[in-house]
Image: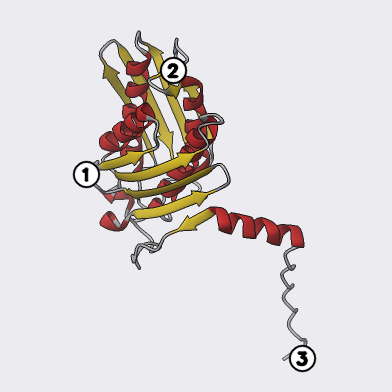
């Protein structure tokens, strides 16, 4: 025995006042609702247990979202923007995940806050539902035709956020939805889902058809990326052996 004392572990620095204020602000903004699922954070694919319920309240919007990944595509979406409801419902129906989402925002100001925050909350809810993401396929892609338009979507749930969006939209509105905020929704979705998302519509005549084809393709791509791969045996589909969560 050398008699030497073991080196003391360095103490964690106490959070600064600014950091404590930031943490308190985030706690007021986000809520993660208990779904009584004790298996939620266990490693490996969890089948019916892969779900989450998240809400976010700010001075601009109030949104709550519930997702069941291994569902049947049942939806109840109410954002007060009819065409946005239509797009999100189409995405969930073709992704075969159950989606309940209610959003209220300061639409008297602009649509941007509401539509972007819907993307943030949907992305965070999907991220929470995936848990540690072990055993999933991780990537998915789909080419979806709708009449004269065609939409392509590819998703990589690698923990790195990025978006490529391209569509030859001609009008400023589809229904009551401003077309320029669709990219903001997808960017927010990619950010909180921590995914690389590519949504491309190479051609089409109708803006309605182009956006609907894009969101149906996105749903199909998400379904493939989130699916459990039995050959992964609860592991991570990465040569690094890990995916940032």
Q: Quick one: label 3 or label 2, which is nearer the N terminus?
A: 3
Residue lying at 48% horizontally and 46% vertically, measured from the top left: 62
Instruction: Residue at 46% x, 32% y: name it.
Output: 197
Comparing 50 with 230, the one in front is 50
In the picture of the structure, the residue carrying the numbered disc 1 is: 72
| Marks 1 and 2, how far apart at CA | 31 Å
Which picture quadrant has residue 75?
top left
Residue that carries the numbered disc 2 in the rendered image: 173
Q: Residue furthest left?
A: 72
**x and y, in percent, of residue 240 in the image:** 51, 48
Q: Which SS class for mark 1?
A: loop
- Per the image, label 3 sits on a secondary structure element best described as loop
Q: Quadrant of residue 49?
A: bottom left
Q: Is residue 241 visible?
A: no
Neighbour tally class for label 3: few under 14, some 14-19, many 20 plus, Cα within 10 Å: few
- Image vertical order of residue 19 relative to residue 143, above or below: below
Residue 233, can we see it?
yes
Using the numbered discs, state the Cα–Cα distance from disc 1 to disc 3 in whole angstroms.
65 Å
**Judging from the image, what secondary structure is the residue with disc 2 in?**
strand
Frontmost of labels 1 and 2 is 2
Dividing the picture into quarters, in which one does residue 1 lie?
bottom right
Above or below, 214 relative to 194: above
Proximity of marks 1 and 2: CB atoms separated by less than 8 Å: no
Numbered mark located on residue 3 in the image: 3
Give the mark nearest the N terminus, 1 or 2.
1
């Amino acid at each position: 025995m050398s008699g030497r004392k073991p080196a003391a572990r360095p103490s964690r620095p106490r959070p600064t006042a600014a950091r404590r204020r930031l943490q308190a602000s985030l706690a007021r903004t986000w809520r993660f609702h208990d779904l009584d699922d004790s298996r939620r954070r266990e490693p490996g694919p969890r089948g019916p247990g892969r779900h989450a319920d998240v809400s976010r309240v700010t001075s601009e919007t109030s949104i709550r979202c519930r997702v069941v990944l291994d569902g049947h595509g049942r939806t109840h979406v109410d954002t007060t923007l009819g065409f946005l409801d239509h797009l999100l419902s189409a995405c969930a129906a073709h992704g075969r995940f159950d989606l309940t989402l209610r959003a209220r925002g300061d639409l008297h100001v602009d649509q941007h806050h509401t539509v972007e925050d819907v993307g943030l909350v949907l992305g965070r809810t999907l991220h929470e539902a995936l848990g540690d993401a072990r055993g999933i396929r991780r990537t998915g892609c789909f080419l979806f035709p709708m009449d004269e338009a065609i939409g392509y979507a590819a998703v990589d749930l690698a923990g790195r956020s990025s978006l490529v969006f391209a569509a030859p939209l001609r009008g400023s509105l589809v229904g009551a939805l401003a077309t320029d905020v669709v990219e903001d929704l997808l960017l927010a979705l990619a950010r909180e889902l921590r995914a690389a998302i590519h949504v491309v519509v190479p051609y089409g005549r109708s803006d309605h058809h182009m956006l609907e084809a894009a969101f149906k393709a996105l749903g199909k791509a998400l379904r493939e990326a989130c699916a459990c791969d039995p050959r992964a045996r609860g592991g991570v589909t990465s040569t690094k052996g890990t995916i940032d969560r």
